[in-house]
Amino acid sequence: MYVKAFKTRLFKEKEDLLGFITSHIKKLSEGDILAVTSKIVALAEGRVKTVTAKEKDDLIKKESKIALKTKYVWLTVKDNTLMANAGIDESNALGKVILLPRDSFKAAELIRKTLKKHYKLKRLGVVITDSRTEALRRGITGKALSYAGFQGVKDYVGKKDLYGRKFKFESVNVADSLASAAVYEMGEGNESKPLAVIQDVEVKFQEKINKREAMISLKKDMYAPLFKSLFKK
């Protein structure tokens, strides 16, 4: 697998996202996967607000299915994903806050459909990336907020391991794995690299995706006992 992040000029609020992408990436090849940070997708949609501290708290609760105030952040569930502050970000926002895109899966498919035509491609994947922290681990890793054009989960159930034992539950989150590689190359500071291209990676390309294939309900999640306080909300 080869990942290349692209340094760009600053993306402006309500700017043409597709024009921005094609102006910085002159060529994409068959089988490439384009990673786009969720921040510029949200900026293109105008998902930016100026809020007070109290208004920010209210906005976080409004954007979340579940919201629990903790010492450091609001621990929230949004789009069936555990995250801090409903994904609302203040970094690189000029004193404002940037929300997550309205419908990230719809945005990913629109980007893919348009760029397939622009670059004259049959197989192209798109992943919209975000950053997440993990419980009991220091630092952030990349996560796929959404994706299009490829199967997001590789299932091993029913297949055999090295010793012939059949897998009962195992699967690999392809979308998150690709997002993590891309986010590492993009950086989290002032790198100004909101785009990345992933090449030479084995994925199953397909026109339609199941946007719930990587999701597990809170009640069925193996970590559910840790979040009893959330379930009471």
Image (tube, rainbow, N blue to C red):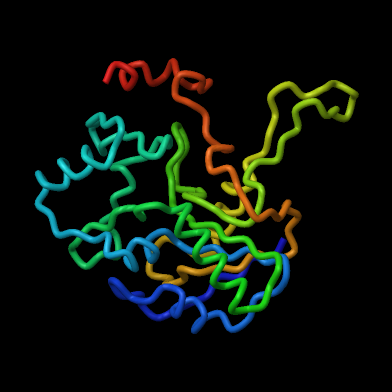
Is residue 180 left or right of 3 when viewed as pictured? left
Residue 225: x %, y % from top left: 44, 15
Image-quadrant location for residue 25? bottom right
In the image, is 124 to the left or to the right of 84? Answer: right
Q: Percent from the top left, x then y, of residue 32? A: 67, 66
Left or right: 132, with 150 as reference point: left
Q: Which is nearer the eye, 139 or 64? A: 64
* Residue drawn at (61%, 75%) of the image: 117
Q: Examine the rendered structure and indicate whether residue 101 appears above or below residue 110.
A: above
Q: Quadrant of the N terminus?
A: bottom right
- How many marks overall? 0
Residue in the picture at 70% in, 40% down: 154
For the C terminus, the quadrant is top left
Up-down relation of residue 156 to residue 125 (above or below): above
Residue 112, image x, y percentages = 56, 65
Compare residues 71 and 96 and report the one nearer the observer: 96
Residue 222 in the image, given as x and y percentages of width and height: 53, 20
71 w.r.t. 90: above or below: above
Q: Camera-side residue: 160 or 7?
A: 160
Task: Using residue 65 as the reference point, say whether residue 110 is left or right of it.
Answer: right
Residue in the picture at 55% in, 53% down: 147
Q: Residue at x 68, y 73 (%)?
A: 121
